Image: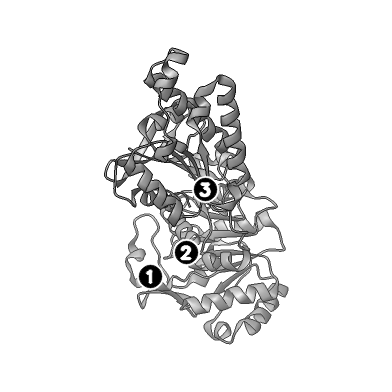
Amino acid sequence: MPRCVVVADDLTGANATGVLLKKNGFDTLTLLRPAMDKASSLSRCDCLVLPTDSRAIPGEEAYARVREALELLAGPEVLHYAKRIDSTLRGNLGRETDAFLDFLGPAYMAVCVPCFPSSGRVLVGGHLLVGGRPLRKTEAASDPKCPICTSDALALMRGQSTYPVASIHLDDVQDGAEHLAEVMSREREKGTRILLVDSVSEEDMLIVADAIVKAGIPVVSVDPGPFTAIMGKKLLPKEAKRAEAKVLCTIGSVNAVAATQTIRLLSQMNVAAVFLDAARLLESPEKREEEIERLTRELLAIADTSDVLAVIGSGIDPENRIDFHLYTNRWGVDVEGLSQLINTAFARIALDVMAQCPQIKGVYSTGGDITAAIHTAAGTVGLRLLDEVVPLAGYGIAMGGTLAGKAFISKGGMVGDEQAMITCVSYLQQHIN
């Protein structure tokens, strides 16, 4: 479940608020209303935003939609609730705020800060100004669905809500958080449930947020987005940084270009590498299994030492290259068949390591046969191609099979300059993190 739940009255506003939360470092998802019942199947996130599409419908129906959303999304993990309202106060802001207060109970207050300084929306004396003009003198006044006939936000909120509403003016805000916290506490003691607070800048909103924290009052933030984003920073502790995702390299090409690129990779990047002895793979089925198990075990043992792991064919060194003809007669298999044995060994090692090291989110492979062997063994259905990293090296995401969602870059062994392998691995690191 999320740590912050935002209910918006339309999709555009939901996404606008979600983007502000994302900019503050929170993983944010928008859940569309027709898919509300699928909330539990979503991947974990910090903030979940849900639009109720309720701006232009009757107030009681809007209330019901917000209440329904809260009943579905609320939980003990939620540290902050927010009601996203239109930046020009159109819609059912009062009744939708009531839905929050009814659901959350008498301990909560709603703090409404309908201020969006970067868009010219400020609240002074309880009146909303848009680009320096009173709200009622703007195009919002003649909106065909939700016309606005007043600039008085306090009057609008009082006209729609069933709860006591009070207004806090700019002087109290700019006297500082300590003073404002006392004002808020007094209003709470008087039974006020909705506070409409003046603000003309981000600094003002920061003071309001600090005052809420000092007063220790559980609140619902009601605003067009900026104040909710600030409250998120105040109330949602940053979680421990997730471990960096890892890249696994499978390097089987034995030509001089691949050898030079591999040497560059090993010398310029921190790589935890093991070397596959192709001769052992071809000695006997037993030796082959022993070699696969050895490399898998050794690579997993050093996986925590680097974010780049690699299994490299020992034939990258010309002195270790094998003569396939020594084995064709022994096994009655042609060179292509022997190569396939090596490729499937690479695939086995790669898949076994990834199965036991879930931090691996991307795979770089050199050699088309090795790449094909990995995807065949994994049951990959296809690759969603997204970019060309260097000429003849494509970046994509695996579809289907056990590697679904993993990022891939494959490159021919003779493709690219000396830095091409580093370029590909660095690209993968950037995109998976």
Q: Spatial distance from mark 2 to mark 3, Cα to Cα?
A: 39 Å
Disc 2 or 3, which lies upstream in sequence?
2
Q: Nearer the viewer, mark 2 or mark 3?
A: 3
Vertical relation: 417 (above or below) 410: below
- Which quadrant of the view contains residue 355? top right
Q: Please state the horizontal and vertical placement of residue 108, each as a whole percent of the image.
A: 68, 63
53 or 61, nearer to the observer: 53
Asked if the residue at tag 1 contacts the one at tag 2, i.e. Cβ–Cβ closer than 8 Å, the answer is: yes
On residue 119, the disc is 1
* Image quadrant where residue 326 sits: top left
Residue placed under numbered mark 2 in the picture: 224
Q: Secondary structure at mark 3?
A: strand
Q: Please determine whether, in this image, residue 188 is positioned above or below residue 295.
A: below
Which residue is more in the foreground, 125 or 332?
332
Q: Which residue is mark 3?
A: 246
Task: Report helix, strand or loop for mark 2.
Answer: loop
Looking at the rendered structure, the kind of residue marked 2 is Pro
The residue lying at 68 percent from left, 56 percent from top is 104
Determine the secondary structure under disc 1: helix
**Residue at (34%, 38%) from the top-left corner?**
255
The mark nearer the N terminus, 3 or 1, is 1
- Residue 46: image quadrant is bottom right
Gap in angstroms between the C-alphas marked 3 and 1: 41 Å
Q: From the top left corner, tell me how far across and down residue 118 is, in percent.
A: 39, 72
Question: In the rendered image of this protein, does residue 118 appear above or below residue 174?
Answer: above
